[in-house]
Image (spheres, rainbow, N blue to C red):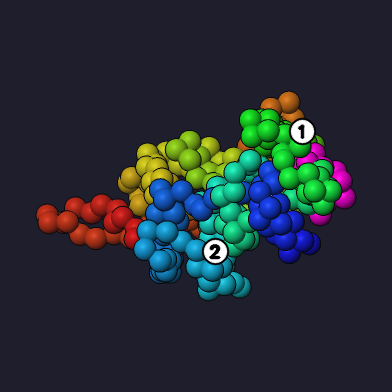
Amino acid sequence: MLLANEVVAEQLERHGARCLYRVHQPPDPTKLAALRSFVQGFGIGLETSGDEVTPREIQALLESVDGKPEARVIGQVALHAMRQARYSANNFGHFGLAAPVYCHFTSPIRRYPDLVVHRQLRRLRRGEHSGGQFDAGALKVVAETASELERNAEAAERELLAWKKVAFIEDQVGETFDGIVTGVARFGLFIQIVDNLVEGLIRVEVLGPEWFEFDAARFELRGAASGRAFRLGDRLRVRVDRVDRVLRRVDLSPVDGAAPRAPQRRHRRGGAKRPRPRG
């Protein structure tokens, strides 16, 4: 299927026919630097060819942690470092598939971009080498509209799934579950419950009476006084405290005995102690 998509796009491009490409550009350098910094916290290096990265190098990173506890969270951060795939009237290649040219052709005629490619290929086979009904400007509008509608459909799907999950967990208020930290923000921790994949939030004020400092580079909340650290990928035992179906919100709290990362301390001159930064 992937090969057919590449061959069709290559055929259209070779003959100068306009094509609605499916493009996926390389990661943003800033996000790539954040990924490299993040995996270094696990003692893992991200080998790259200079300032850029290749699909093979990303794959090597994921293979190096396969089967390890940190594999899931590193995969998530790597995914967030990637740009979104989109449709384009110009060929920028497909980074994720390591394909120099790519289009959507093989779906069962359920996406409009596929129909565009089918029509352009049909015109090419008939000897019509022009752009057909699509001039350069019209094809650009089609690409932008198709990409926008795709994002809207994905957002609607996520919203429906979120509503279903909230409705499912509503009858389990007060129960406890194993969870994984899937997001860290200044205001708290996003937790995904392992058993049912429901996502909820532990607000920072629930973590304790001390001040928690947010480190965006390390995806971490750290207690200023105790040095307790909560980081992306940590496992916590959590309790469902409150469910709001209208706002699609699940409030969680850590169960007594939940184990954040142990504080690391060093002595300052004069005997005072302070939290030692990770990394």
Residue for point 36% across, 63% down:
50
x and y, in percent, of residue 160 in the image: 78, 36
User: Residue beneath label 1, please?
Assistant: 133
Q: CA distance from mark 2 to mark 1?
A: 36 Å
Q: Is residue 30 left or right of residue 120?
A: left
Name which residue type carries label 2.
Pro
x and y, in percent, of residue 31 in the image: 45, 49
Q: Look at the image and say whether residue 163 sits in the magenta stretch.
A: no
Q: Quadrant of the N terminus?
A: bottom right
Q: Farthest residue toward the top?
A: 246
Mark 2 or mark 1, earlier in chain:
2
Quarter location, residue 267: bottom left
Task: Determine if residue 16 is in view.
Answer: yes
x and y, in percent, of residue 147 in the image: 67, 37
Name which residue type carries label 1.
Gln
x and y, in percent, of residue 268 in the image: 17, 56
Residue for point 57% across, 57% down:
95
Q: Look at the image and say whether residue 107 sits in the magenta stretch.
A: yes
Count residues near mark 1 (Cα–Cα under 10 Å), then give few for <14, some for 14-19, many for 20+.
Answer: few
- Which region is colored magenta? 106-116
User: Residue beneath label 2, please?
Assistant: 55
- Element on which disc 2 rests: helix
Q: Farthest residue toward the front?
A: 127
